[in-house]
Image: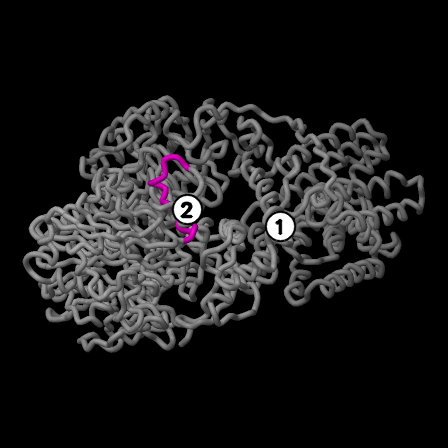
Amino acid sequence: MTDARLFGYADPLCAQAGKSVDFMVSAEGTTEVKAELVRLVHGDFNPDGPGFIEELVATDIPTTLPVTRQYTQNGSFARVEDPDGQLAPDGAFTVFAFIWPSMPQGRRSVILSRWSVNDSRGYALGITPEGKLEFWVGDGKEVDQVTADAPLVPKVWVLACASFDPATGEARLRQIDVQNAWNSHIGPVTPYDHNAHVVETLRCKPERADAPFLIAGAHEENPERGTFVSLHFNGKLDRSGLIGRALSANEMAALASDEAPHDPVAYWDTTAGYTDTGIGNVIQDTGPRGLHAVGVNRPVRAMTGWNWQGRDDSFRLNPAQYGGVAYHDDALTDCGWTPTLKWTPPDDLRSGVYALKVSAGEAVDRIPVIIRPDKPRAKIAVLMSTFTYLAYANEHLSFEAAIAQAIVAHTPVISGDDLEYNKLQEFGLSTYDHHTDGAGVCYSSWKRPIINIRPGYRMAGMNFPWALPADLSLLWWLEHAGYDYDLITDHDLDREGADALRPYKAVLNCTHPEYYSEGMLDATETYLCEGGRIMYLGGNGYYWVTATCPDDPACIEVRKLDSGSRAWQAEPGEGYLASTGERSGLWRNRGRAPQKLVGLGFTTEGMDRSEPFERMPDSFHKRVAWIFDGIGDEELIGDFGLALGGAAGVELDRYDLALGTPPHTQLLAASINHTDNYPLVSEEITYAFPGRGGSQDPQVRGDMIYFTTPNNGAVFAAGSIAWSQALPCHGGENNVAIIMRNLIDAFQKDGALPGSAYTGDEKHWR
Amino acid sequence: MNDKVFHKVGRRPWEWRGKPDGDTERRRRRVPGTKRHWLKWRDVHNDKSLTRERVLADKMPLWWTLGLGAVVLVTPFLSNTMIGVVTIFCIYAAINVLWTLIVGTAGIFSLATLAVVGAAGYVAAACNVYLGVPWPLMFLIGPLTGLVFGAILAAPSTRLDGLYYALLTMGVAEICRVFILQLRALTASGGAITNVDGFIPEDWFLQRPGLLLGFAGAFVLLLGALLVWRLVNSERLGMLLRVARASREDEAFAEAVGIDFRRARLMVFLISSAALGAVGAFYAMYFGSISPQIFSLDTMLLLFAMMVIGGLGRAEGAVLGAAIVTFIDKGLIELGPPRIILVALCMIGVTIFAREGLTGARAQFRDFRNRKSGEARARRTEKGGEAMPEEATEVHDKQELYYRRFNKRLRDRLKQLITPDLIAEHKKDPLGHHSDGLARVLNYFRRGEMADKYVIHRMKPAEERFRIMAISGERGRPPRVVDDREYTDIKEAYHAVFLLRVNDLMES
């Protein structure tokens, strides 16, 4: 049974006791798996910590589950079901679309189709492997086509238009140049001729295909898998339509001069239905029949269109110029598997990170699910960074990003699971990856197996745990130290706002709360103003403007632009979120620098080694000295840790009044001695000059700070990803843990905080 | 080694190219009854100027038209003897084209091609002479006989392969010859049937008009053979066989997925045999007689020589070979026996110097030039070094050329930094505070391209057992294992990668 392969995911990833959760499992090489529920106590197997610990939980889950192979539809496209064949005209017709193909050559792709690949029936407008526009028809026996003369030039807008008259068999194919100075990858100075105009008499007529109408793909079927979509298109498609007669050459030219078609059968106006707060997943047919096209695997909206004039940088300013919809052959936001197990966690189930452990022979998979209590039970909450987990889900950095090794200063250490996922390429990409055509990935969802939220997983690039597996170190320590906690997630906070935080005396962040929505920032702010206490125990937090898709919270959206440590750069004019209509990029570029909220903001990252913190003079002030009870005056704090041997490392945040750190903030400690593999981050660099690494630049450090907020609220921040991973060292009893105990003990109590009375003027004799 | 001579590169285009305008409507006409265009015009973007150019992607139709047109235009002005030679060329070329179909497309190595022609010729001639069947009907009798004979020959082809089948078919031809020679009725004429009627009126026989008519007939016969060749190869049958041939070892697989290509082979064989039967009937009519010579080994070998010289498996090869050999054998008849030696010499020459006959010479020349330019480049440039102008023409992203120059010089500097001390420093602490020299070397290594970049593979989850792999650089293509060494300490593994990279650097 060593051949069995198991994959799975939980929906929702953020579950709640008393509410049901679905587990989807796909299995090859077995028809049955052993199922157990485990609570994930600690993830990493590092011998300096407690090791990998999971705890079997008694449940009503059947001990064995029947499983099957489940298939995944990769690639984004839009579908009109069209059961009545309204889009399969019997007479003459014309199809057209504005296209911006990003990879026209290499393999056949389809722009618009009502075409069955296996039956060779129907019609399609597409692109040949040689990169030429083609219109083809098939009657089930024969296929005939008319092909444009010249290959398409990548990333240049053209109007593609084809008409066919079954009475004469005449097909007309026109490709009309609509390039301007703004809209395409290259400018009008290039001597290309983007036009083509071919007329040919075809030998067969399109028979009605047993297939839906598809934008950016074609229908295919096989006995094993059933129906699916293939021949994906890479690039952008703007407005498209079907007209119930053969347009003349001049009428086609009129379409290219921005005239909406008269009396269309269907006209998919990609700019219809835009609102100030976002764009949905449905491409509206503004024609008489209302045959709307529904996006699958989230075609990217809010993209610049064929007529973009560059003056407006958001779809909100000029929707008519923002008809672009980007399609990708490797997009995946929902595997759409059938649930293998539907399970309702009992109301009294302890809040925690659980996993459905499925096994067959040697094959084991742990499908994580975060369970928050049915109602608030503990005094403190740990906010699990589910946005971050999704942003990094199935990242390909070690395999695909040439600069990754230079950033992390490591040779990657890959596991067998990495090899498996990388070979399969079935479970999608992270927001750190690029689509086949080089475009950045802006969507990520939990409705797919995600390798790097498995409990023992180490991020290949740096050989230590990242995000969820790393966050288990904090949970292990809280349990070890005897603190009760409730788990809540980014998704809960995004949905419920401050209500999610209010029940708790203190809220602890995880190692890397990097992705935040506006609602989450607002909620955190409100909580702090109302006297809440935040322990920000991570690095590079509150960084990217992120949102969940309104129609699918499982899916997050982020666009990377302008500055910051960005794996990709949105194209000009494409930096706004389709989900909410807000400008994405860094929060600090939108007036919400993290310093304003928690006093610290991202300053450096490096993955060769972590360092300890050293106390700063402020830590001896009585307002905060209680935090250091039990710590020596010159004791190095956290010169140990599961993440590169220190509590200050990986990604570090800095105090900066200029960026809005509250003026009364006290700088308690700062990290020292970083290597030059910790450079100052790009958003801090205006002029570039040498010597911005750890050994030369004083801004390369991690800071530990404390400040109070209204109504007895407070923020403690240790701006380092490595912080929580130092907790499990030395059996969980160490100086990082001492600071944590001092803080949590104080934060759990109602009323004034320790040290808060020391507000007098300083009158020193020495 | 590196003489650093910068040759000027660049060439004017030698072939005519159209300057199409994409805005103008272009009506593309097709060969009636097919999806094929008359000529395979293709537009390309010239990568030097980005302007659009129209090129003839498949020039074969042009060469065929020129070649066959020249035959039609020149022949009427030739001497009577030469008209005869051209006519024979047409007949042999037709036979060869059909034989090519059998050997090339169907992949059946039959040497009984002439036996089919002969048998059909004999039957058709006999019907005409002894049964008084009028000559036009011979064009029906010939193909039918060819079909029957072909069917008989086809049966063993599914059983025997290659050489054995070739020997068998040779035997069949010989049996035919001996059979005819021993027929009592024909002993008087030495086995020949004479006075066969034909499309050439009797009083024109061996006269100029008769010879021209004969040539015209033979030319049409050749066109017919080419049409059969084209139809078989462009339709499903031929495509199927081409697919099957491309993956010979996958015949079983092809059959398993439902491609009945054994049947397709037989179909091609039968179609060709019927066509050969028509050639046989024509042969008897054109000469007014038919003799056992047609079954003889030397005629068959002459045909074989044509195929070898022209190039096996291609129609143009069959025709070109027929032209050369017929010219030597029949046109240079005054030379006497040495002309046969000449044919043999041609054959040997072509076999030695050309890979796939004369028609394959162009591709062979191209390969030869590529090899030579590869060799020249290897002499003129160092591995990983700067690109010379001739190589630069093939690099699309010109920035790559600068990277190569820069990285070459960077490597030269970094090589100076590699010392035992530096290696010891890395060994002591692969992830730490490093000296400036080591930091520079490491940063160069880490910035390298993805393809062949080293990674460490943790062989079992949570176990300290590592080996070194190299990334493919292509999505979905797994990394390869670099060597079989295993490491039980991650620091050792980091250092092993470092040593591999130092080694790569020093060897570059």
Front position in the image: B501 or A613:
A613
In this picture, residue A325 sits left or right of residue A762: right
Magenta region, residue range = A675-688
The reply to whether the magenta stretch includes residue A687 is: yes
A2 relative to A112, above or below:
below
The reply to whether the magenta stretch includes residue A391 is: no
| Residue A642 x, y percent position in the rendering | 34, 65
Label 2, residues with CA under 10 Å away: few <14, some 14-19, many ≥20: some
In this picture, residue A569 sits left or right of residue A357: right
Residue A240 visible here: no
Front position in the image: A513 or B167:
A513
Residue denoted by label 2: A696
The kind of residue on which mark 1 rests is: Gln
Residue denoted by label 1: B416
- Residue at the image point whose x is 38% and y is 54% from the top: A673
Mark 1 and mark 2: span between their CA atoms?
26 Å
Prevailing secondary structure class for the magenta stretch in the rendered image: loop
| Residue A652 x, y percent position in the rendering | 32, 52
The chain to which mark 1 is attached is B
Residue A515 visible here: yes
B9 relative to B169, above or below:
above
Element carrying mark 1:
helix
- Residue at the image point whose x is 74% and y is 51% from the top: B117
